[in-house]
Amino acid sequence: MILKTLETMGAQHGYGIARRIEQTSVIFARDYGTLYPALLKLEQEGYIKSAGACRRTTGRAKFYQLTRAGKKQVGRETRDWEQTQAILARFLAPDEA
């Protein structure tokens, strides 16, 4: 969801990513405890990079953006998801005897 958010919306800070996920998914609303470790992991894997920081009254905010590897990973994960959906649709379809 993080990679797709960055693909769709462009560079975002952690709070912006969290808000977008919250808007599209009730299940994952306000789960900041897993967001920042996930951002760190994605950065270590080379799928995202943190770009400059912005000064605010509360401190600095990192902005994250997709790398080339991240764009490829979004494509792979999208294809995997589409295959999974197709398999489940065939499996759950009523038998046509």
Image: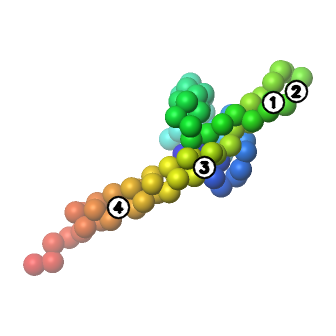
Q: Residue furthest left?
A: 97
- Where does the image place residue 33, in percent across and percent down from the top left? 56, 24
Q: Residue at x 66, y 37 (%)?
A: 49
Picture layout, residue 27 above or below residue 90: above
Quadrant of the drawing holding the C terminus: bottom left
Which residue is at the front of the view, 92 or 78? 78
Q: Amino acid at mark 4?
A: Gln
In the figure, 56 relative to 5: above or below? above
The Cα–Cα distance between marks 4 and 1, rounded to whole angstroms, is 38 Å
Spatial CA distance of label 2 from label 1 is: 9 Å
Q: Which mark is residue 83?
A: 4
Residue 50 lies in what quarter of the image?
top right
| Residue type pointed to by label 2 | Arg
Which residue bears the numbered disc 2?
A: 56
The amino acid pointed to by label 3 is Arg
In three-dimensional space, the C-alpha distance between marks 3 and 4, rounded to whole angstroms, equals 23 Å
Asked whether disc 4 touches disc 1, contact meaning CB atoms under 8 Å apart, the reply is: no
Q: Work out whether mark 1 precedes mark 3 in sequence or the reverse, and give the earlier one.
A: 1
Q: Residue at x 81, y 24 (%)?
A: 60
Label 1 belongs to which residue? 53
Amino acid carrying label 1: it is Ala
Compare marks 2 and 3 and give the one earlier in the sequence.
2
**SS type, badge 4:** helix
Residue 59 in the image: above or below residue 29: above
Between 41 and 22, the residue placed more toward the observer is 41
